[in-house]
Image (spheres, rainbow, N blue to C red):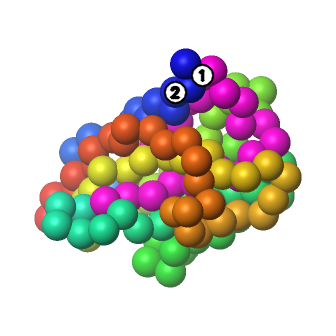
């Protein structure tokens, strides 16, 4: 059974930090692009960050650039999102997703085939 399971969400004050993790089971992510997306209440799911298959290239949404860092651990079949200087507008459900093999970072939802169920991140003022 293919599963992407996110963890690390929670409640944090503005200016704080959280690190999200996404562990894959039943599917390998070693040769795949991975991404993080988020969805706030009443809004569409939006791209946050992506990393290519070997971790050498990353892509970020303008809204998180300089504050968030995506990383990948192929040995652990996992991807992470370090979030610093969090803002109230970062509040959302964050989901990880697996994209194509041996390609660069991707920002379009249509490039991703497997999705996790998400973890809630709430930033208070």
Q: Percent from the top left, x then y, of residue 82? A: 51, 51
Residue farthest toward the bottom in the current orientation of the protein: 62
Residue at the location (47% across, 71% down)?
64
Residue at the location (48% across, 67% down)?
47
Q: CA distance from mark 2 to mark 1?
A: 5 Å
Q: Which residues are magenta?
A: 17-39
* SS of the residue under disc 2: strand
Camera sees residue 15? no
Q: Which residue is mark 2?
A: 3
Image quadrant where one finds the N terminus: top right
Whether residue 23 is in magenta: the answer is: yes
Camera sees residue 97? yes
* SS of the residue under disc 1: strand
Image quadrant where one finds the C terminus: bottom left
Most common secondary structure along the magenta stretch? strand
Whether residue 6 is in magenta: the answer is: no
State which tag comes first along the sequence, 2 or 1: 2
Is 25 positioned to the left or the right of 33 in the image? left
Residue at the location (81% across, 42% down)?
31
Q: Percent from the top left, x then y, of residue 78? A: 63, 34
The reply to whether callout 2 and callout 1 are in contact (CB within 8 Å) is yes
| 80 to 66, vertically: above or below | above
Q: Quadrant of residue 85?
A: bottom left
Q: Which residue is mark 1?
A: 25
């Amino acid at each position: 059974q293919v599963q992407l399971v996110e963890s690390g969400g929670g409640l944090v004050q503005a200016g704080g930090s959280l690190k999200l993790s996404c562990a894959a089971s039943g599917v390998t992510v070693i040769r795949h692009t991975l991404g993080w997306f988020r969805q706030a209440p009443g809004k569409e799911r939006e791209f946050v960050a992506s990393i290519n298959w070997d971790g050498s290239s990353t892509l970020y949404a303008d809204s998180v650039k300089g504050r968030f860092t995506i990383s990948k651990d192929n040995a652990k079949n996992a991807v992470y999102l370090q979030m610093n200087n969090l803002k109230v507008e970062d509040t959302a459900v964050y989901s990880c997703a697996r994209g194509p093999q041996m390609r660069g970072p991707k920002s379009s939802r249509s490039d991703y085939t497997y999705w996790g169920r998400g973890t809630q991140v709430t930033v208070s003022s």
